[in-house]
Image: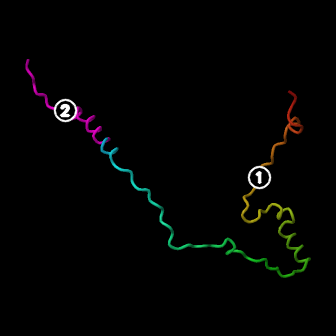
Amino acid sequence: MSTTNHPVAVKDLLPWALVLLAGTAAAQSPAAPTQPAMPTRLQYTSTLSGYQAYADEPVQSWREANDRVGRIGGWKVYAKENPPGVAPAAETPAAPLPHGAHHGGGKP
């Protein structure tokens, strides 16, 4: 019987190399848990730091105020305005509900 020497292919050694690496990784000790570093300086910001107290507006003539509202367009213009910080409402009117929806739905 004759034996021939075959060169070892890299693809034949790859599974053994992976087993060796896996065994090495399993043999390592787990890392010690680390505690998060505490802040060196605490900082507090009050939520009331930007508070602006109510200030009375100067009294004006009611006739001048009514005339100004009339020049602007009346109370309907004020009703369309949004208060600061509020998103505008949709301009399209809501569709009316069907009659059955008023009483909890239609008949079964």
Residue 15: where, in percent of width, then height?
28, 34
Write down the residue under mark 2: 9
In the image: residue 92, left or right of residue 9:
right
| Crowd class of label 1 (few under 14; some 14 to 19; many from 20; radius 10 Å) | few
Q: Find out whether the residues at labels 1 and 2 contact each other: C-beta distance under 8 Å.
A: no
In the image: residue 65, left or right of residue 19:
right
Q: Quadrant of residue 45?
A: bottom right
Q: Residue lying farthest top?
A: 1
Q: Residue shown at 72%/63% (left/top)?
A: 85
Q: Amino acid at mark 2?
A: Ala
Which stretch did the figure color magenta? Answer: 1-22
Q: Quadrant of the N terminus?
A: top left
Q: Quadrant of residue 25?
A: top left
Q: Residue lying farthest left?
A: 2
Q: Pick the residue in front: 88 or 75.
A: 88
- Cα separation, mark 1 vs mark 2, equals 75 Å
In magenta stretch: residue 85: no
- Tally of marks: 2
Labels 1 and 2: the sequence-earlier one = 2
Q: Residue lying farthest right?
A: 63
Q: Pick the residue in front: 23 or 43.
A: 23
Q: Pick the residue in front: 103 or 10.
A: 10
Q: Residue shown at 19%/32% (left/top)?
A: 9
In magenta stretch: residue 4: yes
Write down the residue under mark 1: 91
